[in-house]
Image (cartoon, rainbow, N blue to C red):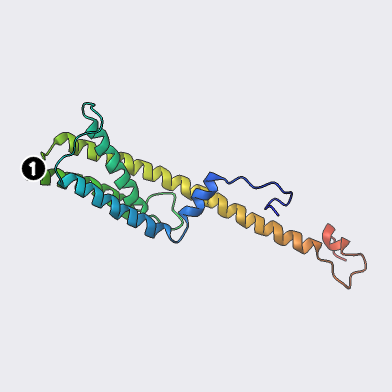
Amino acid sequence: MSPLGNGTPRTPNPRALLALLAGHPWRLACTRCAWALAVAVVVYQSLTPQPDMLLDVPNIDKVWHALAYLVLAVLAAGSLWDNPPAPVLPRAARWAAWSMALLGVAMECAQAFLPGRMASAGDVAANTAGTWLGVLLAGVLARHLARWHGEIAGDAASGQKADSTASTASTVSPTSTDGGAARISGRQG
């Protein structure tokens, strides 16, 4: 039997899925593991000899820097969100996200001392821009996830209230002589 009761399968709501995942107890652990893995990948890529670029586009590495640090900032903030998320990023989440810009500066400073690598102010700017965009994106995500989580919780609460009202209204007392019509219509008798 389908959840709708008429044989029609229910279409999944992506917002509901995101809201449920946002409040899932494993979300923090998974986000923290993803953040640690992303930091390890960025540190490894920053400290090993520079690979050849896949695309022969001038300054494409700045785009990769910005995207990498955007992901780092979102994961850093997400690993410290409340569960379920609050509509505003907690201060610790913002600091964790901004610490990724400091990681970018540290990686560029370290590259100055590595053979085959060179420090670049442009890379620092791209890392910082990516972090800034990541903090903005994390704030937007926190606001939307909190709203969606509230809508889902509100829908669930109103559904439970409707279910309890329906079950109360359909219950007929064995001692009533009117078949429960007084209680269903709201009359006391």
Q: Is 177 placed above or below 58 here? A: below
Name the residue at 66% across, 59% down. 160
Q: Is 187 placed above or below 39 here? A: below
* Residue 69 on image: x %, y %: 27, 43
Find residue 33 and report its image quarter: bottom left
Residue in front for this viewpoint, 47 or 169? 47
| Quadrant of the rendering where the N terminus is positioned | bottom right
* Residue 64 on image: x %, y %: 26, 37
Name the residue at 28% across, 42% down. 68
**Is residue 124 shown to the viewer in this render?**
yes
* Residue 28 on image: x %, y %: 39, 58
Q: Is residue 99 left or right of residue 27?
A: left
Residue in front for this viewpoint, 27 or 87? 27
In this figure, what is the number of numbered marks? 1
**Is residue 80 shown to the viewer in this render?**
no
Q: Secondary structure at mark 1?
A: loop
- What residue does disc 1 label? 112
Q: Residues within 10 Å of mark 1 (few under 14, many from 20)?
A: few
